[in-house]
Image: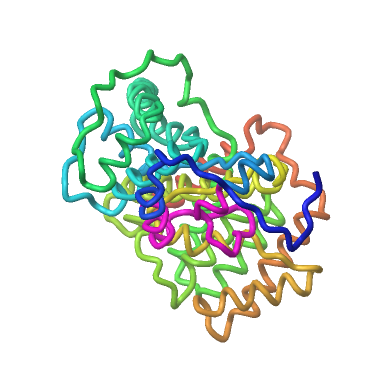
Amino acid sequence: MDLEEDATILFRISSDFPRRDVEKIAGRLASSNSLIPGFIAPEVGLVSLQALLYAELIDRSETIVLLDRNIASRMAKIAREGARRPFDGPTQIAVDLMALSQSMNLDLEPVIAFRELAHNHGNEAALEELRWFRAADTGQAQAWIDVALGRADALPTTPAVEREDYDLSQPFHRYRCNYAVLLKAAELELSGKPPPDRMADLCRWMVSDFIVAGPATLYCAMFFSPFAAKAGLFKYLRSPHRQRALTGIRNAAWDVTYLSDLSRRAMTESFETKRNLLATADQALAEIAPLLFIDAEDFDAFEASLASLLEPWWGKDASSIAGCIASGIDAGRTRPSPQAPEEVEDYVGDLIAAGERRVLLS
């Protein structure tokens, strides 16, 4: 039935539901700034019990939590080895999130995390850890609550589930595109040009030679900026061991891929049936993510909102940087896609190879 806007909704929670424990865990997650919504968060709080119950029972909407590798791996490790205290920040987030997800019927989605693991350590390592993640994600809400609140240091004996047969190391198109953009960004960073020129050159290159990758562009807007707290975005970029520089760029490309997956889902999946969150302990990603979901009526309003959000990173140059990004996005929507030369079978791969050569020689 239709509900009036000022209607009051009452939920009756079973007397054996550990409400106070779950509210404490949800509050800790909310204050951790580790959950990034791909939608406008409700005023009562992103993971308040009221909001989650309303989404599930009234809107009939599924809440899906996309996990980054640090979070997914720590969940698997707790199932395999038990808890080792004191918890570091990512482990506390992982334990709290698993307790909340099993208590409130949230759906954990680790596919990008295990693709990243397979890319870095091989398919067998990823499949083995996935077995333990599946074991962790088996209904045992009270056990996870007890671990989260320090009452227990291990789950009940939980064997790893049967091995799944996937090739998670197969080339992943979205990651490859992000990697190509970040290789170009690394080249521009090492060029010595002023930061605004680096940003402008990147936008021009994406329009003329590639795709305009929104999440990668915003990641680079933070990386090139003179004022943002951007340590660790591109690790080892100036290392004398140039292969380490490539390792750092690849890691950054996976970070961008989590953002691009959240953005893709938010744009293509119905909010009425699915609500997507990204769980990450990476505070830089949490700072970048809101720029992906600017709610503006037209192009000018979008550019103005983007400039306002970029001001802490760019100061007086925020308006010009926002104009560069917005113009690039607009051009990317209207211009024909760049065409690869006839002799090039894998255009993205060709750009990656060229970018890697330039970084290695820099």
Give how far across and how far down residue 2 sits, in percent: 81, 48
Q: Is residue 285 above or below residue 222?
A: above
Q: Quadrant of the C terminus?
A: bottom left
**Is residue 362 something one can see in this rendering?**
no
Residue at left offset 43%, top offset 45%: 250
Residue at the limit of the structure toward the front, as seen here: 15
Task: Judge from the rendering whether residue 288 lies leftward or rightward of residue 270; answer left or right.
Answer: left
Residue at left offset 45%, top offset 77%: 226
Q: Nearer the viewer, residue 143 or 261?
A: 143
Q: Nearer the viewer, residue 162 or 46?
A: 46
**Is residue 80 something one can see in this rendering?**
yes
Q: Nearer the viewer, residue 204 or 100?
A: 100
Residue at left offset 65%, top offset 29%: 345
Give how far across and how far down residue 198 sits, in percent: 54, 68
Q: Quadrant of the N terminus?
A: top right
Give how far across and how far down residue 207 sits, in percent: 71, 56
Task: Judge from the rendering whether residue 144 lies leftward or rightward of residue 203; answer left or right.
Answer: left
Magenta stretch in the rendered image? 25-52
- In the figure, residue 190 lies in which quadrant? bottom left
- Is 40 part of what is drawn in magenta? yes
Q: Nearer the viewer, residue 227 or 81?
A: 81
Task: Judge from the rendering whether residue 238 lies leftward or rightward of residue 113; answer left or right.
Answer: left
**Total number of numbered discs in the rendering:** 0
